[in-house]
Amino acid sequence: MKAKTKPAARKKQKRSAPTEPSAHYDLRLYVAGQTPKSLAAFANLKELCELYLAGKYNIEVIDLIKKPQMAREDQIIALPTLVRRLPEPIRKIVGDLADTQRTLVGLDLSEKAGR
């Protein structure tokens, strides 16, 4: 009598394709002046970029007090807001980016963080 072999376990399908590790990140951080929350958002973003995207990112800080018309381009309704313009698709994260895991998921870097 032959023993039945179990079928190979199926791999879980990923919700979205992981971002290319060599991809360049184009980030815009919308703030309103140099408030504590705006400064914290920039510091948190800079730290995450240095840890996970060293040499592969560009951060543009846009102060909507000085350039309010810029809010229309990315449809900004809350501040601070981070917009990942590249790699596509565009993603937005609202807040001071203190929740590291949430920010990594928003930037589609959660797989890199798990390594």
Image (tube, rainbow, N blue to C red):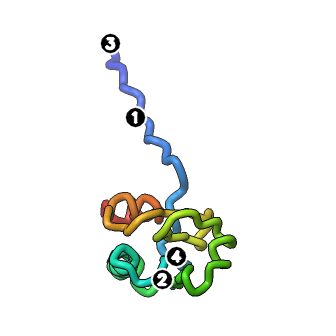
Please give the residue where the numbered disc 1 appears in the rendered image.
9
Dot 3 lies on which element? loop
Q: Earlier in the sequence, mark 4 or mark 1?
A: 1
Q: Earlier in the sequence, mark 1 or mark 3?
A: 3
The extreme top residue here reads 1
Mark 4, mark 3: which one is toward the viewer? 4
The CA span between labels 4 and 1 is 45 Å
Dot 1 lies on which element? loop
Please give the residue where the numbered disc 3 appears in the rendered image.
1
Q: Amino acid at mark 4?
A: Tyr
Please give the residue where the numbered disc 4 appears in the rendered image.
30
* Residue 26 sits above or below residue 77 on the image: below
Q: Earlier in the sequence, mark 1 or mark 2?
A: 1
> Residue 43 location in percent, x, y?
34, 80
Q: Quadrant of residue 86?
A: bottom right
* Residue 89 sits above or below residue 48 on the image: above
Mark 2, mark 4: which one is toward the viewer? 4
Please give the residue where the numbered disc 2 appears in the rendered image.
56
Q: Amino acid at mark 1?
A: Ala
> Residue 21 location in percent, x, y?
47, 72
